[in-house]
Image (cartoon, grey):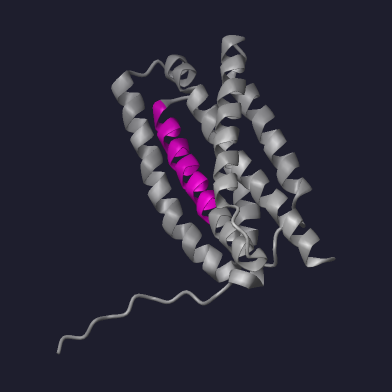
Amino acid sequence: MSQLRQYSRARIAITTAFIINGSIAGTFYSRLADIKQDLAISNSALGLALLVVSIGVLVGLGFSGKQSAKRGSAPVTFYATYVLGASLLLVGASNNYITLCLTFLVLGACLATQDVAMNSHAIVLEHEADKRYMSTFHAMFSLGALGGGVVGGWFSQNNIPIMKHVAFITMCVYLANYAVRNWFLPAELDKHAVEGKKKIKNP
């Protein structure tokens, strides 16, 4: 396979990852009002649950960075996408406030894990191809978020249960991720040893 074709395929794979991340975020936020109504929770309770998402993001950031360094950003992006889809299913299956907060934590961690890995892989592609793609990738994230929000609004407007909605989105995510499974760049390109924190000795 020529390098040009390899880079073109990698670009499609990374674009797919960005669209997926955006679409899941858009899907999630589009159904928050329905989640609040179904579980009969207050605005303050929902706000606290959303804070848990942020905590999950912080957890995912550190985890993804270490795993991308240890295993390469390509496999982390690929497998994190599958787990991200599953985390959306967990949110849809939540039937009380405690499980909702737990699934929000998992979703936040999964969003951040895939986000860091796919951005790392995008940097690898830019370096290898000696071209700039990042602005386009981020535009695709925004497009995915818009699409997820529009589709989510349609599902909500037509009173389609959240579980059916997220199951449909997850199925689309899995099919798209599987389709590009062999199009990422080799993991070895950005795999490196993870260095621990060095202790500073007092003089």
Q: Magenta stretch: dominant SS?
A: helix
Name which residue lies at 43% across and 77% down.
195
Q: Is any atom of residue 38 visible in this view?
A: yes
Q: Is any atom of residue 87 visible in this view?
A: no
Q: Check the image and report above or below for 179 versus 199.
A: above
Q: Check the image and report above or below for 35 versus 127.
A: above
Q: Where is residue 171 in the image (x, y as percent from the top left)?
A: 71, 34
Residue 179 covered by magenta stretch = no
Name which residue lies at 59% across and 33% down.
143
Furthest-right residue in this view: 1
Quarter of the figure with the C terminus: bottom left
**Image side of residue 108 versus residue 49, left or right:** right
Q: Which of 104 and 158 is in front in this view?
A: 158
Q: Where is residue 191 in the image (x, y as percent from the top left)?
A: 58, 72
**Image side of residue 183 versus residue 33, left or right:** right
Quarter of the figure with the N terminus: bottom right
Furthest-front residue in this view: 131
Q: Position of residue 112 (x, y in %)?
A: 48, 48
